[in-house]
Amino acid sequence: MQIVICPGIHQRELTQKFIGDLWFLGENNLLQMDNMLVFPQEGILTLSTFHILLFLGDRLRKRNRLESPVIFIGFSAGVVGAMGAAIKWQMGGGYVKALIAIDGWGVPVGGNF
C-alpha cells in the first residue's frame, strides 16, 4: 500500500511536522517511510491533479508498484489536488483504497473509495 501526501499552500516545515506525527503514530509498522510519497510541489501546483498524477505514476513505476493500493492524504489546499488525482487514478484503473481530507475548506469529497 502506498500513502500519497498532498500538502497545501503553506511552509514546508508544517508538512514535515505532519509526516513526523504520522511516523510516530505508525510505530506498529502500518506506516513505513518507504510506502509514503510526499508530493514535492509548493504553491499553486498543490492544486494540480495533473502534476500529482505525473508524480505518482513516476514514483510507483520506479518502485514497480503501479498495482499497489493507494491512500491519498490531503490537507488544506492539497485536498483539491488529492481529490482530483484520486478520482483520475481510479478512472485509469488504479486502486484507491481511501482519501483522507484534512481541513479541506469545503472541497466536495466524492468518489468510489
Image (cartoon, grey):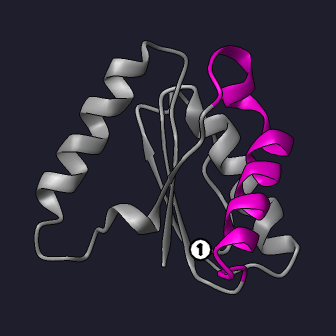
Say which of 5 and 37 sits in front.
Answer: 37
Q: Main secondary structure of the magenta part?
A: helix
In the image, is residue 77 above or below residue 58? Answer: above
In the picture of the structure, the residue carrying the numbered disc 1 is 113
Residue 103 screen position, x and y as percent:
41, 31
Three-letter amino acid code at the position of disc 1: Phe
Residue 15 screen position, x and y as percent:
38, 30
In the image, is residue 109 above or below residue 111? Answer: above
Q: Residue at x 88, y 74 (%)?
A: 92
Structural crowding at the residue carrying mark 1, measured as other residues with C-alpha within 10 Å and reported as few (<14), some (14–19) or many (≥20): few
Say which of 19 and 105 sits in front.
Answer: 19
The answer to which image quadrant residue 112 occupies is bottom right
In the figure, is residue 65 to the left or right of 29?
A: right
Q: Residue at x 44, y 68 (%)?
A: 35
Residue 78 screen position, x and y as percent:
57, 33
In the figure, is residue 3 to the left or right of 113?
A: left
Magenta residues (range): 41-66
Say which of 36 and 91 sits in front.
Answer: 36
